[in-house]
Amino acid sequence: MALSEIQDQDDHDWENDVADQMSVLVVDDKPQNLLAMRALLADSGLEVLTADSGPAALELLLTHDVMLALLDIQMPGMDGFTLAELMRGTERTRHVPIIFLTAGSQEAQRSFKGYEAGAVDFIYKPVDAHVLRSKVAVFADLHRQRLLLAERIVEQERLARVNALMLSALSHDIRSPLSVMMLNAELLIRQTESPSLQKAGQRVKAAATLLGRQVDHLGSLARRPCELLQVHPVRGDLATLTAQRLDVESNQAVMWAPPEFDRVGDTSGDFDPELMAQALDQLLMQAATHAGDSAIRIQVDGGAQRSLMLRISFDTVLAPEASIHLFGGNEPVSGMSSAQVGPGLQEPERVARAHGGSLIGVSRARQGTMFELLLPRLQAER
């Protein structure tokens, strides 16, 4: 059996399970009306629960989950409005859709009271079988979709946890041989007098440093695979922070050569310095990884009144697989509130989006490669 057929079969089985779980509650003080409603809904595939009073309905709701309640308005003792208000006041039944059954006139005041009590619709007696079945089918489909969505969410969360565990284990397993690589590269640099071997050792050390940063990135993904980032903005200077992160990258021998750095205008603004430092580190690491021997140019532009722009560019044109890894498959558009990126830029793009900004990138022949990070200058103007 093909995988798609297995998936279709799983979906079919799950939908059958969902149908088995769905119940509709009918409340009416007249037995003949309850009997008629049972007959009208007999072919719906739903479990039909009936109650002849408000108190009896509340008892059923304590032990049954219902996807829809059909309530007669005119009942002795507790009428339909009162029952609906009690249902809305209880957490267990607060979100159950309610349709009122009434033989009264379609006056505005009565309808207003019904909707105020929590009704989503009215059905007027004598009940039209087609109208009843159609409305019940709509709510049954909505309930089925909610259950399916809840199941999918649970499955996605389970897969995210498994993925996080695998990433964490992988990053741990890589660190030991990586440490050996860096130690031997450092020994080669210190002990050899050959310029070519020293340069080779520096290259190995730089490559191992880059790999170590990628491992740290994997660890970051493992710790927060799906959660939203919490931004704590303070007043700062984006150009100053960028220069500080450049010093860190250079000290770790990540850059093959010192980059060209330029600042334009007022580069102060509101941002979370910790998150922005992480985003800058990722962008600089990707630039160092893919620029090769090409010079890296960095500009922080504060010329716009309401925004700050960080551009990182180099002349190297990315190979197709590297471009997909960084930018995804879609052509980015400057100024978008968010743009699709590939896994290589996922973390800095999340940081930009959490600040109300965007991150895009392009790599074209004769133009080279560019990352562009756009941030609102003031978080209050997001």
Image (spheres, grey):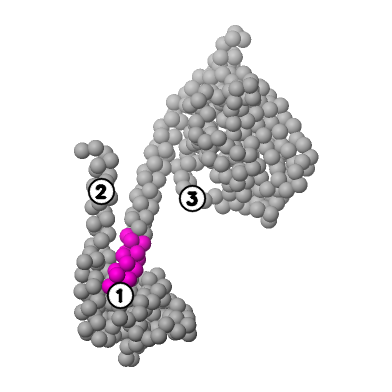
Q: If you read the primary sequence from the N terminus, does the residue marked by circle 3 or circle 2 appear first? A: 2
Amino acid beneath label 3 = Glu
Amino acid beneath label 2 = Asp
Of 234 and 351, the residue lying toward us? 351
**Which image quarter holds the N terminus?**
top left
Q: Is residue 180 above or below residue 263?
A: above
**Going by the picture, which residue comes out furthest to the right?**
265
Q: Where is mark 2, residue-wise?
A: 10
Magenta region: which residues? 129-144
For the residue carrying disc 3, how many other residues have a C-alpha within 10 Å: few (<14), some (14-19), or many (20+)? few
| Residue drawn at (36%, 62%) of the image | 142
Which label is found at residue 242?
none
Q: Mark 3 vs mark 1: give the one in front.
A: 1
Provide residue 137's location: percent of width, then percent of height. 31, 65
364 falls in the magenta region: no
Q: If you read the primary sequence from the N terminus, does the residue marked by circle 3 or circle 1 appear first? A: 1
For the residue carrying disc 2, how many other residues have a C-alpha within 10 Å: few (<14), some (14-19), or many (20+)? few
- In the picture, residue 281 is in which quadrant? top right
Q: If you read the primary sequence from the N terminus, does the residue marked by circle 1 or circle 2 appear first? A: 2
| Residue drawn at (62%, 52%) of the image | 232
Q: What's the distance in space between the residues labelled 3 and 2, CA to CA?
A: 29 Å
Provide residue 113's location: percent of width, then percent of height. 46, 83
SS of the residue at dot 1? Answer: loop
Of 61 and 96, the residue lying toward us? 96
For the residue carrying disc 1, how many other residues have a C-alpha within 10 Å: few (<14), some (14-19), or many (20+)? few
Q: Does residue 357 show up? A: yes
Q: What's the distance in space between the residues labelled 3 and 1, CA to CA?
A: 48 Å
SS of the residue at dot 3? Answer: loop
Q: Where is mark 3, residue-wise?
A: 227
